[in-house]
Amino acid sequence: MIKALLTGHSRGLGTAIADALLARGIPLLALARSGNPQLCSAHPDLLQEVSLDFSDTPSLQAWLHTPALRDFFADAESALLINNAGLLQPVGLVGEADATAIAHAVAVNVTAPLLLTNAFVATTRHCADRRVVHISSGAARSPYAGWSVYCATKAALDHQARAMAAEHLPGLRVASLAPGVVDTAMQAEIRASSVEQFPQKGRFEALKNSGQLTSPDKAAQRLVNYLLGPNFGDVVDGDLRHLPD
Ligand code: NAP
């Protein structure tokens, strides 16, 4: 049986990934601050939610010390971890950010996925097939003025994936994938930035106005097809739009 752990299922790309996994009958343990009542009522037997705030690292550590993960994966033969939860803020030039916002972003975008990945790998040693995917960003690979914290956190995920791939752990495959420009609340947040905070704001407005954003469902279907497919992990730091099916 395949089982999956997913973060950030409450909205956006995470909801669409959850939907795609649940539609395939894959039991899901889903972590975010908010729940997703619609998914819960559609899949009461497959979806378990845990409310966690990843900016509160001690709470996440405390949860990882409970038997929840071990119990969930106990009867799994294949195990998936999708580190999707993330945030864009603080947006603005270096020197203008609030220190708390920087620490918050690092906790959610880097500390939480690293802790979850470590716990996942430790808990799924009995699984013949284990797959970890980090939802990265083009911002991990191209510098964007105003997004230095976001760029740095996503680059950290890419490099964690490269290092973990180099360990060749039994049954483990990993990829850190940029999903493209996906039509979610995060894109609305980007368009709501000021030009002073984010000089490339106009480019993202133009993508939206010309209908070039990918729908969350399309990005999620592509991600889940690749995640479950035979080629997963061949490219460790890829772009979902350019991967083979
Ligand atoms: P979104 O709509 O803002 O959703 C973000 C998700 O992360 C939510 O489910 C949210 O759940 C969760 N999250 C945020 N802060 C959290 C916290 N403190 N603790 C636990 N969970 C938290 O964003 P999205 O566009 O779907 O983005 C999903 C992923 O794709 C992110 O990693 C993002 O960086 C990446 N990405 C997105 C795009 C894009 O164009 N949209 C492009 C490149 C990469 P709660 O609020 O319920 O906690």
Image (cartoon, grey):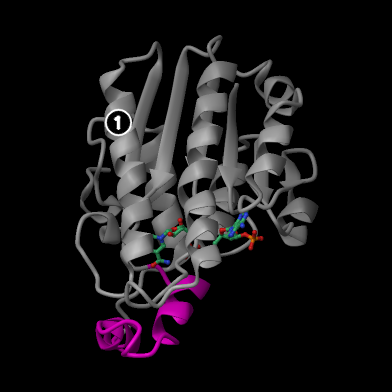
186 vs 181, left or right, is right
The residue nearer to you, when weighing 163 against 197, is 197
Q: Is residue 213 above or below residue 46?
A: below
The residue nearer to you, when weighing 60 against 15, is 60
**Mark 1 neighbour class, 10 Å CA radius: few under 14, some 14 to 19, many 20 or more:** many
Q: Locate the C terminus and report the quarter of the image it occupies.
A: top left
Coordinates of residue 90 in the picture (x, y in percent): 45, 71
86 vs 136, left or right, is right
Q: Is residue 217 above or below residue 111?
A: below
Q: Tell me what residue is drawn at x 38 percent, y 90 percent.
A: 194
Q: Is residue 219 above or below residue 234?
A: below
Residue carrying label 1: 233
Could you tell me if residue 184 is visible in this image?
no
Q: Quadrant of residue 164?
A: top left
Look at the image and give the residue range highlighted in magenta: 182-210
User: The residue under label 1 is which amino acid type?
Assistant: Gly
User: What secondary structure is found at the residue carrying circle 1?
Assistant: loop
Q: Tell me what residue is drawn at x 68 percent, y 30 percent.
A: 64
Q: Tell me what residue is drawn at x 53 percent, y 50 percent.
A: 107
Q: Is residue 83 above or below residue 153?
A: above
Q: Quadrant of residue 150?
A: bottom left
134 vs 175, left or right, is right
Q: Locate the N terminus and report the quarter of the image it occupies.
A: top right
Coordinates of residue 99 in the picture (x, y in percent): 50, 66
The residue nearer to you, when weighing 217 against 101, is 101
Magenta-colored stretch includes residue 142: no
Coordinates of residue 131 in the picture (x, y in percent): 43, 28
Could you tell me if residue 143 is visible in this image?
yes
